[in-house]
Image: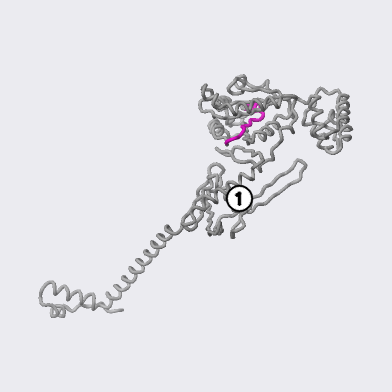
Amino acid sequence: MPETPSFDLEKIKQSSDGSVTSMASSAFNEIVVNNPYFAAGGGLMLLGTGLAVARSSVIKSSSFLYRQMLVDLEIPSKDKSYLWFLEWMSQYKQRSSRHLSVETNFVQHDNGSITTKFSLVPGPGNHLLRYKGAFMLVKRERSGKLLDMTNGTPFETVTLTTLYRDRNLFSELLLEAKEMALKAQEGKTVIFTSWGPEWRPFGQPRMKRMLGSVILDTGVADTIVTDVKDFLTSGDWYHKRGIPYRRGYLLYGPPGSGKTSFIQALAGELDYNICILNLSENNLTDDRLNHLMNHIPSRSILLLEDIDAAFNKREQADDKGYVSGVTFSGLLNALDGVASAEECLTFMTTNHPEKLDPALLRPGRIDFKQYVGNATDDQIKRMFLRFYEGQDELCEKFLEEYHKLDMESISTAQLQGLFVYNKRDPISAIKSVKSLKHPDNSIM
């Protein structure tokens, strides 16, 4: 074992002049300076202190240089530009990505065929891109603890880092991403559905449907379009008279008569989008309904389909142990209450108007009612000539064969199905007229 160091008190006394200061100095030299154990420990302590100071200086210096030379832009997943940027980056060629995520667009058609499209977007991790000569580090992070309460997905952020001198490129990049997203929707109708407390696009934007492609009875379409356009240009008139600036429309009639198709075509005519709200959704409450109706995306039509069926099963739902989320009074208040939305264009459809409560039908909730019925002779002619242009003689022959069936009425959806099946052969369409009376028998 190493010997314990000893101190020579006599030596300390001899090396001092007897004063307290001199003795203290001699004692320090003897105990500290001339002591090899203490000198070694002191050296290590000084070395450790020096390294710690140097490390702290490097960290502070690098942090200072980072703040002076680099700049960050954080885009949270709840921000609208988040999806714009990811879509833009997925199509940007001057990038280097080693982490990718797949987005699958799956569509099953009516005939059973399936169309699948895969899009590869930058996944969580680091990516490098060069934009207008400037290098940018893109870091996509996914939180393992925080969740987006609207859809239950992990909360994400994208952080862009570049030189401070190139910070103005952030705005140009985001503007380019926005323009690309809007261009993808140009000439198309976006369908929105409720997702939690917000509206989200449902599937891919649809091609605008031409107003002339929906054949309604003479004057019906023009009457509705004229009224809607008059409402959209009458905001000042409503405000000056203290009248809530909103208008509700009810299209009623038998199924397959073109009510929903006309609303889609009307949205295309006005360059509007469509927000579809399912009042029978179990998770929909009065508060959420009011919130959604007050936060409809701009230039959008609110569509409530089959309004008569929304509250048919309330008692049955109560017997099963749960209560339908939306109450009838909640719907009325959302349409025409104190907290109801302004500048709102609402369309409702029903096959059974007789089932609607009079409270719903009063002005302020439904201001315009229009019957959309089965096909008249004029509609049949116009539909035939739209599919088979210039075939006036065959059109008269088709109408003659149709009258022989002695049917009370036929829906435009049934006629369209017949014409689509014989899309290039009007003679075959005439021969297939009998199938309209017996829809259960295949015309194939």
Where residue 310 appears, x then y in whole percent?
63, 28
Image quadrant of residue 63? bottom left
Q: Residue at x 39, y 65 (%)?
A: 58
Image position of 195 (left or right of 48): right
Specify the segment rendered in magenta: 298-313
Q: Is residue 362 visible?
A: yes
> Considering the image in quadrants, where does the N terminus appear?
bottom left
Where residue 348 appears, x then y in whole percent?
64, 28
Label 1 element class: helix
Colour option used: one colour
Outermost residue toward the left? 18
Image position of 415 (left or right of 25): right
Image position of 159 (left or right of 252): left
Where residue 383 appears, x then y in whole percent?
79, 31
Q: Amino acid at mark 1?
A: Glu
Judge whether residue 301 is colored magenta. Answer: yes
Q: Residue at x 59, y 31 (%)?
A: 321
Image quadrant of residue 320? top right
Question: Which of the two residues, 124 or 273, is positioned nearer the viewer here?
Answer: 273
Determine whether 181 is above or below 420 in the image.
below
How many callouts does the rendering have?
Answer: 1
Q: Is residue 127 visible?
A: no
Instruction: Please give the residue where the numbered disc 1 appears in the rendered image.
Output: 87
**Would you call the spot at circle 1 few (<14 residues within 10 Å), some (14-19), or many (20 or more)?**
some
Where residue 115 appears, x then y in whole percent?
72, 47
> Considering the image in quadrants, where does the C terminus appear?
top right
Judge whether residue 330 is colored magenta. Answer: no
Image position of 364 (left or right of 209): left
